[in-house]
């Protein structure tokens, strides 16, 4: 791994500070997309609609 210089670390820290938080809708869409991508590999009969329906049915865990 190449050594880090102070400017790279500072640039990264600034990017993190400026990053916006995802909205609940964006987080839900990301979860559905992740789940669909993983289940579709195992079972091609699973559709995005099935994943959407199940995501709506189950209660998301409380944020930590």
Image (spheres, rainbow, N blue to C red):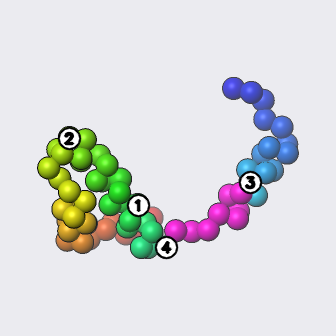
Q: Are marks 2 and 4 in contact (CB under 8 Å)?
A: no
The reply to whether dot 1 and dot 3 touch (C-beta < 8 Å) is: no
Q: Which residue is mark 4?
A: 23
Q: Is residue 39 magenta?
A: no
Residue positioned 76% across, 58% down in the render: 14
User: Distance of mark 3 from mark 4, alpha carbons?
Assistant: 22 Å
| Number of marks present in the image shown | 4
Front one among 46 and 9:
46
**Residue 1 % position (x, y):** 69, 26
- Which is nearer the N-term, disc 2 or disc 1? 1
- Camera-near label (2 vs 3) is 2
Q: Which residues are magenta?
A: 15-22
Q: Can the viewer see residue 58?
A: no
Q: Earlier in the sequence, mark 2 or mark 4?
A: 4
Q: Which residue is mark 2?
A: 42
The residue depicted at 18 percent of the width and 45 percent of the height is 44
Real-space Cα distance between discs 1 and 3?
24 Å
Does label 1 or label 3 sit earlier along the sequence? 3
Left or right of 9, for residue 60: left
Which residue sits furthest top? 1
Please tell me whether residue 19 belongs to the stretch shown in magenta: yes
Secondary structure, mark 3, is helix
Q: Would you name the residue on which mark 3 appears?
A: 13
Give the residue pinned by disc 1: 30
Looking at this rendering, what residue extends furthest in the left direction?
A: 45
Rendered location of residue 55, percent (x, y): 25, 66
For the residues labelled 2 and 3, the Cα–Cα distance comes to: 38 Å
19 in relation to 38, above or below: below
Task: Answer whether residue 13 is visible to the viewer in this image.
Answer: yes
Left or right: 30 in relation to 21: left
């Amino acid at each position: 791994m190449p050594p880090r210089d102070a400017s790279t670390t500072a640039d990264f820290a600034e990017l993190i500070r400026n990053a916006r938080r995802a909205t609940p809708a964006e987080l839900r869409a990301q979860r559905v997309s992740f789940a669909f991508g993983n289940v579709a590999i195992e079972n091609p009969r699973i559709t995005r609609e099935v994943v959407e329906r199940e995501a709506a049915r189950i209660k998301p865990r409380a944020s930590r």
